[in-house]
């Protein structure tokens, strides 16, 4: 039996949302204690946080180059006096189409319990947490493995977010009431700023100013999530435009522009784009007193968005920010190892609950049945589906009907077409009639609700509508062979052959999010084309 002594033990950190706000506050309190103990040389307090177990394995697996994060975690592991290994991906079979799950399961078998993973693929730690824990339970290992996301593609970088938020709070005098921050640079590829979409919730009132030209602007679904989180959001094209107004943030967070990822057209304009997000001396007199600059570091040596002349000014907060990574990562490893956390008393992280509320029973009314109004022969028994993609252009509805028929498995369709709303002839809707159909099972109903949310399902018997249901989008879709993430960089994408269990959760009325990479999909996009 694997014993879990506290809520942090064996916890995977795939995104910043994997820890509750109270848990983050707890980690920051412990980080503050450790930082003060190291500064004052209090060895007895420092020892409280150390794992101090030469049999406890921590493995660093960097499948993408790194300087700051890699070295930070290596030094954190040395602090803890544990068995520490570095995975050499350049000489690994993982580059010869060996699966991620098999590779990491082998490493788990060598008494390794924490894996620090950086990868170009997104959602890797989420998948490894599922497959790795199942592997450990199958073989009755003494502990469950945990996976720390040290950056995955352009998805997230949660450990960077922890050190960033710790530094912001430190500069706020530990006041969590509010923050006004400007995010500057490549907000499209910048996984550190993507983690801020949820990480900034540590503050009760959040104002975010995003400074980036459209080519490297924050993806729209992240902006929407910020607004859903209650953040006040403003968007600016350049630093010059931002400084032309009066409401300037006291904290500026810069990221390195990754224009090399964006093709030749962008590279031809890189000088223009870089100029919009690079701070220069001419801006110095426009910066309010008390402003601080932050950066995940290291900077681009040829094109730094924060020039080196800033290093000797009071604007420089990024050097202390970088040093804070040592403390926050020490504490994170300590918590996941179970060394600390038993005294946590706040609200722990809770897995979301998915309530199947998507099927709504509707009174069929006095009418004999629902059916197309275009002169189609009525059906005596079977099912009739109405209001499919209601309000969309008719050509879009026509294109979607074959997908519905294939996904739900309607093999004897009597009629499928596009009709007009009974109340507004300018509004179109899809219609499918299936005579002699015995009714849909629970799986088919969920498939229909996911592929045609908002439709109405009518059950017809003896020339009468005996049951009628309005189907909304399900809260979660999983274990269907027909679904697939469309993000080619997601670990669950078919092209990576990892055998990942596909899963999407509802985010809004017509949008699903991939469980692994958080990529948004319309209800039409989660299905395989064939």
Image (cartoon, helix red, strand yellow):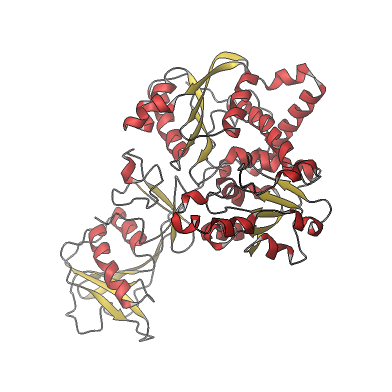
Q: Is residue 497 left or right of residue 168?
A: left
Residue in the image at 44% along x and 54% along y: 263
Residue in the image at 30% along x and 53% along y: 443
Q: Residue 68 appears in which quarter of the rendering?
A: top right
Q: Is residue 230 visible?
A: no
Residue in the image at 38% along x and 86% along y: 424
Q: Position of residue 365 (x, y in %)?
A: 35, 77
Frontmost residue, 127 versus 93: 93
**Above or below: residue 126 compared with residue 202:** above
Frontmost residue, 315 versus 28: 315
Residue furthest out toward the top? 54
Q: Residue 223 appears in which quarter of the rendering?
A: bottom right
Q: Is residue 436 left or right of residue 170?
A: left
Q: Is residue 447 visible?
A: yes
Q: Position of residue 301 (x, y in %)?
A: 62, 41
| Image quarter in which the C terminus is found | bottom left
Q: Position of residue 270 (x, y in %)?
A: 54, 56
């Amino acid at each position: 039996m694997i014993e879990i002594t506290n809520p942090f033990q064996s916890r995977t950190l795939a995104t910043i949302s994997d820890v509750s706000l109270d848990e983050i506050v707890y980690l920051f309190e412990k980080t503050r204690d450790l930082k003060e103990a190291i500064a004052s040389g209090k060895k007895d307090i420092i020892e409280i946080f150390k794992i101090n177990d030469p049999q406890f394995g921590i493995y660093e697996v960097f499948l993408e180059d790194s300087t700051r994060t890699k070295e930070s975690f290596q030094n954190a592991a040395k602090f803890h006096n544990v068995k520490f290994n570095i995975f050499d991906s350049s000489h690994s079979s993982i580059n010869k189409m060996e699966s991620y799950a098999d590779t990491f399961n082998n490493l788990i078998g060598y008494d390794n319990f924490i894996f620090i993973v950086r990868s170009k693929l997104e959602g890797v730690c989420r998948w490894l947490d599922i497959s790795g824990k199942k592997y450990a339970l199958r073989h009755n290992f003494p502990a469950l493995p945990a996976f720390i996301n040290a950056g995955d593609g352009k998805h997230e970088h949660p450990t960077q977010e922890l050190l960033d938020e710790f530094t912001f709070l430190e500069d706020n005098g530990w006041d969590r009431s509010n923050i006004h921050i400007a995010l500057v640079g490549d907000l499209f590829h910048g996984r550190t700023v993507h983690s801020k979409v949820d990480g900034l919730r540590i503050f009760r009132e959040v104002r975010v100013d995003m400074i980036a030209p459209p080519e490297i602007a924050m993806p729209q679904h992240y902006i929407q999530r910020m607004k859903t989180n209650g953040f006040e959001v403003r968007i600016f094209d350049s630093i010059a435009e931002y400084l032309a107004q009066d409401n300037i943030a006291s904290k500026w967070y810069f990221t390195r522009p990754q224009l090399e990822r964006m093709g030749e057209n962008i590279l031809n304009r890189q000088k223009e784009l870089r100029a919009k997000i690079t701070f220069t001396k001419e801006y110095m007199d426009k910066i309010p007193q008390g402003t601080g600059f932050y950066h995940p570091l290291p900077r681009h040596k040829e094109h730094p968005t924060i020039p080196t002349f800033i290093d000797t000014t009071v604007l420089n907060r990024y050097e202390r920010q970088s040093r804070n990574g040592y403390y926050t990562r020490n504490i994170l490893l300590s918590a996941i190892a179970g060394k600390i956390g038993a005294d946590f008393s706040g609200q722990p992280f809770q897995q979301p609950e998915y309530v199947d509320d998507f099927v709504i029973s509707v009174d069929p009314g006095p009418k004999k049945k629902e059916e197309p109004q275009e002169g189609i022969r009525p059906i005596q028994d079977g099912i009739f589906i109405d209001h499919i993609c209601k309000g969309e252009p008719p050509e879009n509805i026509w294109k979607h009907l074959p997908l519905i028929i294939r996904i739900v498995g309607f093999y004897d369709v009597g009629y499928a077409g596009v009709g007009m709303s009974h109340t507004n002839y300018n509004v179109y809707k899809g219609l499918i009639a299936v005579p002699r159909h015995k009714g849909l099972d629970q799986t088919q109903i969920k498939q229909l609700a996911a592929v045609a949310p908002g439709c109405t399902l009518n059950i017809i018997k003896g020339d009468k509508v005996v049951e009628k249901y309005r189907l909304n989008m399900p809260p979660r879709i999983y274990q269907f062979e027909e679904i697939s993430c469309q993000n080619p960089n997601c670990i669950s994408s078919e092209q990576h052959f990892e055998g990942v269990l596909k899963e999407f959760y509802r985010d809004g009325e017509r949008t699903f999010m991939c469980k692994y990479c958080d990529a948004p999909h319309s209800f039409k996009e989660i299905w395989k084309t064939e």
